[in-house]
Image (tube, helix red, strand yellow):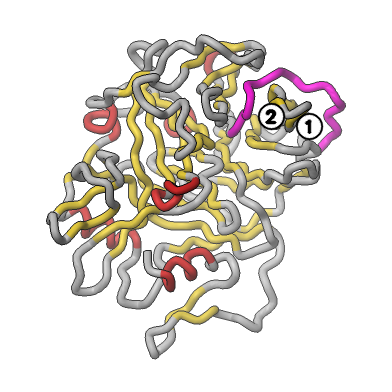
Amino acid sequence: MDTTRRALLKGMAAAPLLATAGGLLTPAGAHAAPETGFVLKRVDRVGPPLLSSWPDAIDSLSGRLRDVELARHVLAGARSRGVRVTDWHGARPSNLDYSFAWDPATQDGRTAAWYPQGMTTSYDAYGGRLPASDEKVAAVSWYAKGNQAHKGARITFVDVTDDPRRPKYRHVLLVEPVKAQGRRADFEPVKFHAGGIAWYGKWLYVANTRYGLSVFDTTRMFQVSAGDWCGYNSARRTYAAFNHRYVLPMHHIYENVGDRLTFSQVALDRSPGFVPSLVVSEYRGADPNGRAVRWNLDGAGEIADVRTKLHWTLQRARVQGAVTVGNTTAYYSANRGEEGGARRQGDLWRQSPLGHPMGDTPAARLSLGPEDLSYDVHSGGSLWSLGEHVRRRSVYRVTV
């Protein structure tokens, strides 16, 4: 991504962008009063006018790359396998219902180059299994770190259908599709923290910390060649994605144009009898005044009303994930920091009704380094979460 376009993409939250007659982008309404309240704006392009929209760029890539399906291609040939968690390091979650650790044959459990963050499932997406193939799937987001940060972010799709003790999984790189007029369609890594994810229908929402929500169409994935670069290589006449076999291109963004909000996590609430909604929450370190904000979704899985006033204070420090169950109950995962240089076990907090005091006793214990949450109504209600720390990583589910 060139410097100009990267700066524009990162600055989208500051003001809407408008093409001028000279072909440059300038903030629209620079002197107008800013939006108040928690307001989003749907955007499907950024950059000079010669650049196609992201959906158009995806269509152009479709003419050059093989379109693939999640179940038939991405998961069917997956070779990595989860294994049983053998050591919780003194931090076994309460009411543990299910768990797995990453494949020891890979670096996934011990690498410092990638950190897992977000959690969602096919229950979020479809109320259960994938509709066409009947697989049960979990999904985890990761961000690249250190000298590998240029690789951006990825999603791991995990098939927990046949042998949940050894689920197979595959990583898919998140990318931004690019198509300039008269030039070949291409893609570039999407560089953000990917701190939370929520999957509803075909749409995968990814928290984009200061800027809003990046949205990916899970029915538009492509297969690429092996290679340690990202995008089209003219010398080799082929596309690659840092040795990932598949890419998932960004379709649009919900840009934060209202009151300042940190999009640390995002979760889905699809409680029976309620309108499906997204819940975005803030991580604020030792500050307990982080906020949670809810946006309702429409029947197509898109945000129904970009302006919302439904928000409340979390009342807990170091919240790493938040999910609601209807209009009354919320669950929060939270770190407790370190004590004597050692990491402490995470907590699960329950708040009901929303916004009311919770007291000082957590509802349950979670793993070391607990991250995002996803609620599953099956088995009487359970929460999925995961641990992020190197050599302390697992994906698990607890009953609530």
Q: Main secondary structure of the magenta part?
A: loop
Q: Is residue 136 visible from the viewing direction of this image?
A: yes
Quarter of the image where the C terminus is located:
top right
- Write the start and end of the magenta stretch as one range: 355-371
Q: Residue at x 72, y 38 (%)?
A: 318
Residue 331 numbered mark, or none? 2
- Residue in front for this viewpoint, 188 or 160: 188
Quarter of the image where the N terminus is located:
bottom left
Q: Residue at x 57, y 38 (%)?
A: 267
Q: Residue at x 59, y 14 (%)?
A: 88
Hey, what amino acid is under mark 1?
Answer: Pro
**Percent of width and height locating residue 196:** 55, 40
Hey, what amino acid is under mark 2?
Answer: Tyr
- Left or right: where does residue 263 sit relative to residue 345? left
- In the rendered structure, are the residues bearing label 1 and label 2 in contact, judged by CB atoms less than 8 Å apart? no
**Percent of width and height locating residue 363:** 75, 20
**Percent of width and height locating residue 265:** 60, 42
- Left or right: where does residue 288 sit relative to residue 174? right
Q: Residues within 10 Å of mark 2 (few under 14, many from 20)?
A: many
Residue 341, relative to residue 244: is it above or below?
above
**Percent of width and height locating residue 109:** 46, 26
Q: Residue at x 57, y 27 (%)?
A: 387
- Residue in front for this viewpoint, 150 or 253: 150
Q: CA distance from mark 1 to mark 2?
A: 11 Å
Residue 353 numbered mark, or none? 1
